[in-house]
Amino acid sequence: MRFPVVLFDLDGTVVDSGGIILASMRHATRTVLGREIADEQLMAAVGGPGLEAQMATFGGGEHVEELVRVYRAHNEPLHDELQLCVGMDDVLVRLKDEGRQLGIVSAKRRITVEMAFAATAVGHLFDVVVGGDEAPNQKPAPDTLLVALERLGADAADAVYVGDSPFDMAAAKAAGMYAIGVTWGGIHGRDALAAGDEVVDTAQELLAAL
């Protein structure tokens, strides 16, 4: 097989969470800052260096803690509504049946990843899960991906990272891994994935690439 190890981003790649992320971003910035921020700006850093860093671009240092608190209070209950991205249940089961090692590497905290698993019931398919709070530096740094490879005892040359953001593509390349961008998440546009090795539009195209 081409890639014995397949690691996935979570938001916008495995779970269809773009809508709830945007809703919580709007809520937090309106509540704390009292102003409207364009959706494109709200979502620009999603999937990257962590929630604190994202919020720092909106409110400056003095508002970051409150922005994060209000965001999480709004966002975490919405995880009960999460669904998988179209076709991803079949992709994960097929890859698992083929004997591949699967993993999740997310910018989310590990506890929030578990909330997503509770709603979508796919957590048992993954051999490793790494949250953004489990390594010193988050994407686009390769740290979380390298943690996943270490826990699996796997080599970067045998692994691919599948994600929907430019941060995913950069982290994969920095880790020495193949990078596949997916367009279905609705968080970042196709052009943002240009640094990857391949870009696919459907779950079937993803299976063919793997």
Image (cartoon, rainbow, N blue to C red):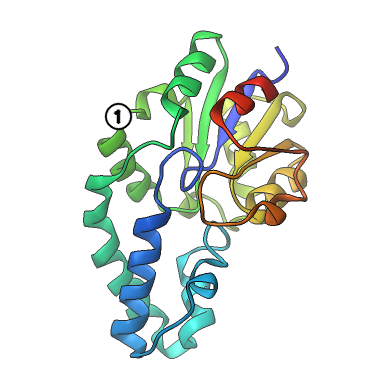
Q: Residue furthest top?
A: 98
Residue 179 sits in quarter: top right
From the viewer's perspective, tell me whether residue 158 is left or right of residue 43: right
- Measured from the top left, where is residue 29 in percent x and y? 37, 80
The residue at the point 28 percent across, 83 percent down is: 31
**Helix, strand or loop at mark 1:** loop
Tell me if residue 189 comes above or below residue 29 in the rendering: above
Front residue of this view, candidates 18 and 135: 18
Q: Is residue 24 above or below residue 92?
A: below
Tell me where residue 85 appears, x and y as whole percent. Answer: 43, 37
Q: Which residue is mark 1?
A: 121
- Which amino acid type is marked by label 1? Ala
- Quadrant where the N terminus lies? top right
Q: Quadrant of the C terminus?
A: top right
Image quadrant where residue 123 sits: top left
Residue 68 at x, y = what percent?
36, 72
Residue located at (57% from left, 26% from top): 152
Question: Does residue 15 appear to the left or right of 201 in the view shown?
Answer: left
Identify which residue is drawn at 34% across, 57% down. 20
Question: Badge 1: few (under 14), some or many (20 or more) residues near its Cα, within 10 Å?
Answer: some
> Between 61 and 35, which is closer to the camera in this rendering?
35
Count the numbered circles shown.
1
